[in-house]
Image (cartoon, rainbow, N blue to C red):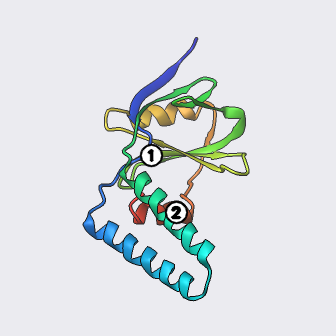
Amino acid sequence: MDEKISWFGPEFFHWEKGVEWYSAVGIIAFALVVVSVIFGNYIFAILIVVAVVALVLFSLRGPRIVNVEINNRGVVLDKYFYSYKNLTSFYLDEESLHPKILFKSSRFLMPYIHLPITEDVDAGQIRNFLLQYLEEEELHEPFFQKLLEMLGF
């Protein structure tokens, strides 16, 4: 029997950034470019400009609505499949501003996988389903992920 729980949700939680956010990014970038030019490091100045342009373009992009599915073989996030063989545990983070499921992976480069949970999904049903395949462990997002959320990403 092929059991599954599925829903549609944003691939990430988008925060609208105001004029203050863009102004702060511009002021910081301008200061770094000026310091780089003063020290004669023109390549770093160009790198900062390119990085800021990429940052602004990324911040303007809204999230796509993706299919999220938890089935008896693993977890599917849009076109990516994560097998239970590569996942060691999970944690339902219902207390944060945006509820999500955190999966701990055995992969070195991507140790945590985040799945957003929408209001129409029953967290208890997800927990009971996942307990058949993985152990529940209190997981916390890495510092860098929390920092990105504080900065509006």
* In this rendering, the label closer to the viewer, 2 or 1: 2
Q: Nearer the viewer, residue 55 or 94?
A: 55
| In the rendered image, the vertical position of residue 41 relative to residue 134, given as above or below | below
State the residue position of label 1.
100
Q: Residue at x 58, y 11 (%)?
A: 1
Which residue is found at the position 48% from the left and 83% from the top?
34
Q: Residues within 10 Å of mark 1 (few under 14, many from 20)?
A: some
Measured from the top left, where is residue 148 in percent x and y? 47, 62
Given the current orientation, which residue lies at the most extreme bottom position?
A: 38
Identify residue type, mark 1. Answer: Lys
Badge 2 marks a residue whose secondary structure is helix
- Give the quadrant of residue 152: bottom left
| Residue at the spot 50% in from the left edge and 78% down from the top edge | 33
Q: On the rendered image, what quadrant is the C terminus found in?
A: bottom left
Q: Which comes sooner in the sequence, label 2 or label 1?
A: 2
Seen at 43% across and 60% down, the residue is 149
Residue 93 location (% of width, % of height): 45, 50
Check disc 1 and report its element: helix, strand or loop.
strand
Q: Nearer the viewer, residue 148 or 71?
A: 148
Q: Position of residue 100 (x, y in %)?
A: 45, 45
The disc placed on residue 51 is 2
Above-or-below relation of 135 to 4: below
Label 2 sits on what residue type? Ala
